[in-house]
Structure formats: structure tokens, C-alpha cells
Amino acid sequence: MGGSTSSAIEIDAGHHWVVGFLGMQFNMDTLIMTWITMAIVIFLAWLTTRKRSLVPHGWQNIMEMMLDWLQGQMKPTLGRYWPVVSGLLFTYFIFLLVANMLGLLPIHHIMSPTSDLNTTAGLAIFSTILVWAIGIHANGMGFFKEFFKPYAPFVIVNLLEQVTRPLTLAFRLFGNILAGEIMLAVLNHLAPVLAPSVWIAFSILIGLIQAFVFTILVTSYLGLTIDSGEE
């Protein structure tokens, strides 16, 4: 019988270049791609604001349209606290949008930093700290009374909710972006021309949706915290 040869599919997504330092391990590819993402965001900010005018055009027009749309979605939820967190929420969205798109580039070893759980977990933990900080600022120490409502035994449920929020934020974003990159690698192996092109178009939409979902969820958590103190 003649032997048959088969080639295994090589998938970079989910694999990392790990470097040990001071007893800790760092995913260097994630760190590099995160710095690249930040550089792109800073460049876009410079490109948008370098020739600002009352009648926006070019990149300024594109960015203002996008931010106006985001403001319409998020400002009613935050009320008077909108100016306090608007810059951060806008940065969240732009950063996540750029980060999610990097893994779609047809370049070997280029991946989305959001396909690493360390990145999404860091963003989720910081978001939770932000929600707590705004809650304490809005309600004082009365913020902690909310954990005992409607009855004292509900403190367990309410604390569990505070723990699950960052977990769901982190895993939702990580899972969707990593799955997209794995599918892109598989389709590129099976049908190198047509299938990846279709999947990239679909992944661009997914990346946009995931950036919006993460940002709007943080906004809703902030809104719930603020509303609880103003009732």
C-alpha cells in the first residue's frame, strides 16, 4: 500500500513567546502588539486633531461621527458623570477596535493583544476598580450599603455579581477574538483565497461589535452604580 502524506495545520493563535523575568513570565508578543496598538491609537489621535476646524473634514470628520454616535449611546446612562469618564470610555472603544483588528492582518505572528486573556483580564479588572471608584465618589461609603439590599443575606449574591462581572467581560472579549483568529488560520489552510476574505469581512464586524459591547457594558455598570446612589 502506498503511503499518504498529510500536513498539519499550523495555528499561531493562542501560542505566545514567553520570557521569564524575576520569577515572572511575560507574553512578549502580547506586550509588543499592545504597544503597537497604543502607538496606532496615539497616531490616530494626532491625525484627527492636527488640523482641527469648525467644519470637520477627513479624519476629524470620521472620528467626530463615531464619537458622537458613542456619546448618544452612553451619555444618557451616566448623566452628570459623563464628562468624568467620557474620555476613558472613548479610549476604551478606540483601543479595543484597533486591537481587535490587528489579528486580521495577513502577516505571520501578528496577533490581536485582545486574543490574550491577560490583556482582557487587565482591562476588566481596571474597569471594575473604576466602577467602584465612581460608586464611592457618587455615594460615599453608602456605596457599600448597596451590597446588603434588598436584604442583608443578599450580600453573598451581590458580592458574587461583582466577581463575575470582570470574569464575563474578560472571557467574552478574549473568547470571541481568539476564536476568530483560529477560524481565520483554519480557513486560510483549507481555502487560501475565498474563505479567509469572507471571514475577514465577518471578523471586522465582530471586532467592532466586541469593542462596543465591552465599552457599553462598562458604561452600564457605571450607570447602575450611579443610579443606586441617587434613588
Image: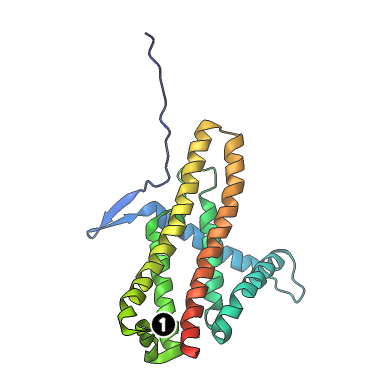
Give the quarter of the image for residue 130.
Answer: bottom left
Q: Nearer the viewer, residue 54 or 141?
A: 141
Q: Nearer the viewer, residue 98 or 117?
A: 117
Q: Is residue 162 left or right of residue 48?
A: left
Quadrant of the snapshot with the N terminus? top left
- Percent position (x, y) of residue 119? 41, 60
- Percent position (x, y) of residue 84? 53, 83
- Percent position (x, y) of residue 140? 40, 91
Q: Is residue 77 above or below residue 118?
A: below
Examine the rendering and report whether any part of residue 46 can be seen.
yes
User: What's under tag 1, amino acid-wise?
Assistant: Ala
Mark 1 nearby-residue class (10 Å; few <14, some 14–19, many ≥20): some
Residue at the spot x=45%, y=50% of the render? Answer: 178
Q: Is residue 224 above or below residue 42?
A: below
Q: Is residue 60 above or below residue 176?
A: below
Residue at the spot x=56%, y=77% of the render? Answer: 86
Please give the residue where the numbered disc 1 appears in the rendered image: 133
Outermost residue, left direction?
A: 23
Q: Indicate the secondary structure of the residue bearing disc 1.
A: helix
Examine the rendering and report whether any part of residue 39 can be seen.
no
Residue at the spot x=31%, y=76% of the render? Answer: 156
Q: Is residue 56 left or right of residue 139?
A: right
